[in-house]
Image (cartoon, rainbow, N blue to C red):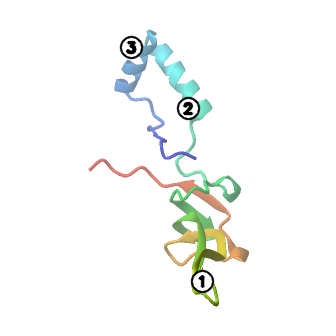
């Protein structure tokens, strides 16, 4: 999922109908038909929970749900490493990764691997002011 998403109210406003009619060079009824087709094809209810398997795993912050628990979070991947030196000469040999993984992280303490969220939805669009 991209952060480039936009959303509109489901109800077609007069201004938007006029804009669609002008750009598509149709009458007002044609603008309504175009709007309905767009909503049917690409629209998604704002409050629709989606299976966690479809959630973005690129660090995008989303709303997570497991039962009654609802929290904001993201899929986080990490890697821990430490510098390694030659035992005799002390020459730096590079960093050695000793732990890595990925998990659902949330602002209320995270989820355990055996208790991951089951559903997600995008964050709402913030207010303009």
In the image, what residue occupies the spot 63% across and 55% down? 55
Q: Position of residue 82 (x, y in %)?
A: 58, 80
| Chain-order first, disc 1 or disc 3 | 3
Q: Earlier in the sequence, mark 3 or mark 2?
A: 3
Q: Give the image quarter of residue 37.
A: top right
Q: Quadrant of residue 93?
A: bottom right
x and y percent of residue 26 in the render? 46, 10
State the SS at label 2: helix
Q: How many marks?
A: 3
Q: Is residue 94 left or right of residue 32?
A: right
For discs 2 and 1, the disc positioned in front in the rendered view? 1
> Residue visible at 44% across and 37% down?
8
Identify the mark at residue 118; answer none if there is no mark: none
Q: Residue at coordinates 70% horizontally, 56% vertically from top-left?
A: 53
- To which residue does mark 1 refer? 85
| Residue matched to label 3 | 22
Q: Residue at x 44, y 9 (%)?
A: 25
Q: CA distance from mark 3 to mark 2?
A: 19 Å
Crowding at dot 2, Cα within 10 Å, few <14 / some 14-19 / many 20+, comes out as some
Q: Secondary structure at mark 3?
A: helix
User: Is 4 rendered above or below residue 56?
Assistant: above
- Other-residue count near label 1 (Cα within 10 Å), few / some / many at <14 / 14–19 / ≥20: few
User: Tag 1 or tag 2, which sits nearer the N-term?
Assistant: 2
Instruction: Rate crowding at label 3 as few (under 14), some (14 to 19) or many (20 or more) other CA atoms within 10 Å.
Output: few
> Going by the picture, which residue comes out furthest to the bottom?
88
Numbered disc in front, either 1 or 3: 1
Say which quarter of the image contains residue 45: top right
Q: Are marks 3 and 2 in contact (CB under 8 Å)?
A: no
Dot label at residue 39: 2
> Compared with residue 39, is residue 79 higher up or lower down, i.e. above or below?
below
How far is the residue under mark 2 from the one under mark 1?
61 Å
Residue 111 seen in render:
no
């Amino acid at each position: 999922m991209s952060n480039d998403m936009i959303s509109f109210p489901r109800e077609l406003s007069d201004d938007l109908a006029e804009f669609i009619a002008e750009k598509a060079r149709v009458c007002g009824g044609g603008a309504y038909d175009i709007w309905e087709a767009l909503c049917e094809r690409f629209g998604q209810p704002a409050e629709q929970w989606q299976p966690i398997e479809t959630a973005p795993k690129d660090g995008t912050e989303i709303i997570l749900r497991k039962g009654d628990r609802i929290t904001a979070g993201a899929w986080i991947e990490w890697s821990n490493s430490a510098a390694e030196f030659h035992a005799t000469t002390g020459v730096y040999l590079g960093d050695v990764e000793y732990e890595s993984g990925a998990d659902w992280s949330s602002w209320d303490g995270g989820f355990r691997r055996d208790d991951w969220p089951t559903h997600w939805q995008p964050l709402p669009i913030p207010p303009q002011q």
